[in-house]
C-alpha cells in the first residue's frame, strides 16, 4: 500500500464537474494498493497517518497531528502510485491491484481512518476520472509505503 500525503489548506475532487469530496485544513491522501496488501497494511498506514506530527504548533514547529488540529481527510484512490518506469517510457501498472481487490481495500482504509479521527472521510469516486484541486500547505508532502516502513 502506498500513500502520498499532502498537507493542505483546502482540497476537493470533482467527477463530471461535480464536487464529490471537499475539505479545509487537513490531508489530501492519494492511495494505491497492490495484491499483497492485507488488513495489517491498512491498519499500520491509518495509524501512522492519524499520528503523523506535521502540523505547526504555536511556535511554528511541525509538532501536531491531524487529530490535534481537528483536520479533515480527503482520500482519493490512485493506482498510478504503483507505476513501474524502469524499462521503456510507458509506465507499467503490473503491481497495482485490480479494482475488485483495491476497491474493498480502499473502502476499508477509509473506514479505519474514520474510526481513528471520529469524523467522516471525504472521498472521490473509485475508478472514476477525477479532477483534484488543492492548496498545498508548506508545501508538505510525505510518501508512505507499507511494505517499506522507512
Image (cartoon, rainbow, N blue to C red):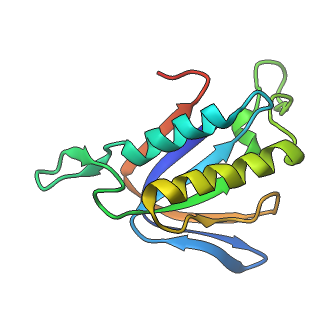
**46 shown above or below 86:** below
Q: Position of residue 62 (x, y in %)?
A: 24, 45
What residue is at 12 percent from the left and 56 percent from the top? 58
Q: Residue at x 44, y 58 (%)?
A: 117
Q: How far across and how far down the image is residue 47, in percent?
A: 47, 41
Q: Of residues 88 and 15, which is closer to you in this image?
A: 15
Q: Furthest residue to the bottom?
A: 18
Residue 131 is drawn in which quadrant?
bottom right
Q: Quadrant of residue 12?
A: bottom right
Q: Quadrant of residue 51?
A: top left
Q: Residue at x 62, y 32 (%)?
A: 40
Residue 97, relative to residue 135: is it above or below?
above
Report whether residue 51 is seen: yes
Count numbered badges in the picture. 0
| Above/below status of 36 relative to 134 | above
Horizontal side of 58 relative to 145 (left or right) equals left
Q: Is residue 77 visible?
A: no
**Residue drawn where x is 70% and y is 50% of the image:** 106
Residue furthest out toward the left = 59
Amino acid at each position: 500500500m502506498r500513500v502520498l500525503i499532502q498537507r493542505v489548506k483546502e482540497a476537493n475532487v470533482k467527477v463530471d464537474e461535480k464536487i464529490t469530496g471537499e475539505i479545509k485544513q487537513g490531508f489530501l491522501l492519494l492511495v494505491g494498493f497492490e495484491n499483497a496488501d492485507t488488513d495489517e497494511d491498512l491498519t499500520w498506514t491509518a495509524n501512522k497517518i492519524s499520528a503523523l506530527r506535521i502540523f505547526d504548533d504555536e511556535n511554528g514547529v511541525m509538532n501536531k497531528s491531524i487529530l490535534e488540529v481537528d483536520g479533515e481527510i480527503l482520500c482519493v484512490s490512485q493506482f498510478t502510485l504503483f507505476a513501474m518506469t524502469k524499462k521503456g517510457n510507458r509506465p507499467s501498472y503490473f503491481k497495482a491491484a485490480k479494482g475488485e481487490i483495491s476497491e474493498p481495500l480502499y473502502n476499508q482504509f477509509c473506514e479505519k481512518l474514520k474510526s481513528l479521527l471520529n469524523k467522516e472521510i471525504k472521498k472521490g469516486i473509485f475508478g472514476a476520472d477525477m479532477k483534484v484541486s488543492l492548496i498545498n500547505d508548506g508545501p508538505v508532502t510525505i510518501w508512505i509505503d507499507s511494505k517499506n516502513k522507512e
